[in-house]
Amino acid sequence: MSRDISRKDWIEQRIKPDEYRKYLDQGQSFIDDKFLQRIVADDSQPDPLQVRDILQKSLEIESLTEEETAVLTRVQDPDLLATMEATALKVKKKVYDNRIVTFAPLYLNNICVNNCLYCGFRTANQQVDRKILSSRQIRDETRVLAGEIGHKRLIVVYGEAPETDIDYMEESIETIYSVKVPVRNGEGRIRRVNLNAPPLQKRELERLKTVGIGTYQVFQETYHAETYHRVHPGGTLKNDYLWRLYSMHRAYEAGVDDFGLGVLFGLYDWRYELLGLVSHARELEEKFGVGPHTISFPRLEPALGAKIVENSKYRLADSEFKRLITVLRLAVPYTGLIITARESAALRDQVIELGCTQADASTKLGIGGYSYDEAAQSKAKQQFIIGDTRSLDSLVRSLIKRGYIVSFCTAGYRCGRTGESIMKLLKTGKEGEYCKLNAVLTFREWLDDFASEETRVLGERLIQKEISRIKQQLPEIYSRFQEYYSKTVDGKRDLFL
Ligand code: SF4
């Protein structure tokens, strides 16, 4: 633990410029500002034939270039727009079929050395009660998440501070994995811990790989360097744009090949940010053969004492947000798109039809908010305010009614389906096959162990339809699947193909 060195020394030792300089091309990063600005500035209406060619490329699960992506942001013709949305849904179905993955965020602390102008947790904010969860409190939180709600997958969120450095991260993840709670059949436990964390050094990422993390998320917040430096003031760790930008490069070197990218939309022009994400995905694909497993697109939301939020001229209207999601689905067709509970239930339901594949539920953002008193949910302990307060049971029921299977599958990283191997499966639609089988098995588990009676009955009907489809579409694996399914119905847990 770095607690024996001063805060100042800790901060000074964090950034290792040699770990990113080697990737620069004559001092330049893969974000080509002039190029992106030029294509964002083009406001000509695209030729419909060109748009249809681009859509065909997406349908073949090929990533789009920045120019092709920009063309899709400029379409105004209503018929063409409707075709784009329908194609986005086809692309999603081809890669992910009718599965939605759910998870819960778990905020472990709200201490941070940074001073991001849009964030309630920033160091200069005196109105925040600072808190770090102890091992006992992490166990309490996990017991509720895994034992009462039924989550299998978490995204744990850390601020950047010496008190919550790599030692704390390692301990907290091990603690989460160690918790087992008796449920209706067997035990509930978290099977996959994804991380939303600050940029880490290569040797730290190697340690996290050993602990068994799922996706490593670092959001760039904004790809526009000038805005980045304005909202992340000088003298803070986060002010170093390149250290953050090359987080995934270090992760890959450390053996972590499951990447999560993201932008905080509303800090700068959404078209530029979208192209930044596309450039980032293309860079990772070209360098390592592995694109982002997920992309997140939170919108700037009111946060305690953060005036910049109300004053930002780049905040996205719902119509722009929907266009963003449609185009992202088409531009990076293989990736998982995460729609968080920052957004309202109604809007989340709509954008799932445009290409989103993952949604959190039963979300509490207060530090200790799952297991402790309601006061933990007070604004003073939250990073932002949530819009969708539905329970997991309620979200699952609403998805079932629209024909979606909710997947609690965490098999991918545990049987080596990450990195290059998952990229191939995603691009050829093969991942959808494995995942469909595992989705049904884990959905069945969840219905039996956690669902309300109403949700269970609806879910069972949907499962029967899915089993008939599996029998027709995957005859070669059907008997093995049936064997696993019968064992699951009999109470056996955590079976996957
Ligand atoms: S956004 Fe993250 S890094 Fe910035 S102040 Fe908030 S918690 Fe810290």
Image (spheres, grey):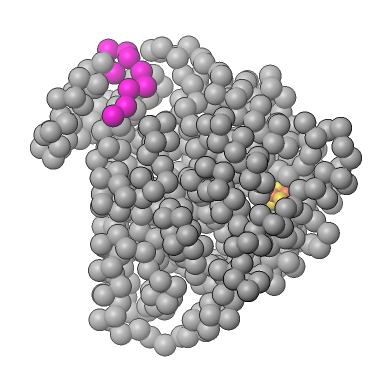
Q: Quadrant of the N terminus?
A: top right
Quadrant for residue 327, please give it.
bottom left
Q: Is residue 206 above or below residue 261?
A: above
Q: Residue at point 30% right, 73% down?
A: 54
354 in the magenta segment: no
The reply to whether residue 428 is visible in this rendering is yes
Q: Residue at point 29% right, 80% down?
A: 50
**Residue 316 drawn at (x, y percent):** 55, 66
Decide which of 217, 398 is in the foreground and name it: 217
Report the side of 192 relative to 435 (left or right). Answer: right
Report the side of 13 relative to 143 (left or right). Answer: right
State which region is magenta: 488-497
* Main secondary structure along the magenta-highlighted residues: loop
Q: Is residue 47 above or below residue 240?
A: below
Decide which of 146, 294 is in the foreground and name it: 294
Decide which of 372, 103 is in the foreground and name it: 103
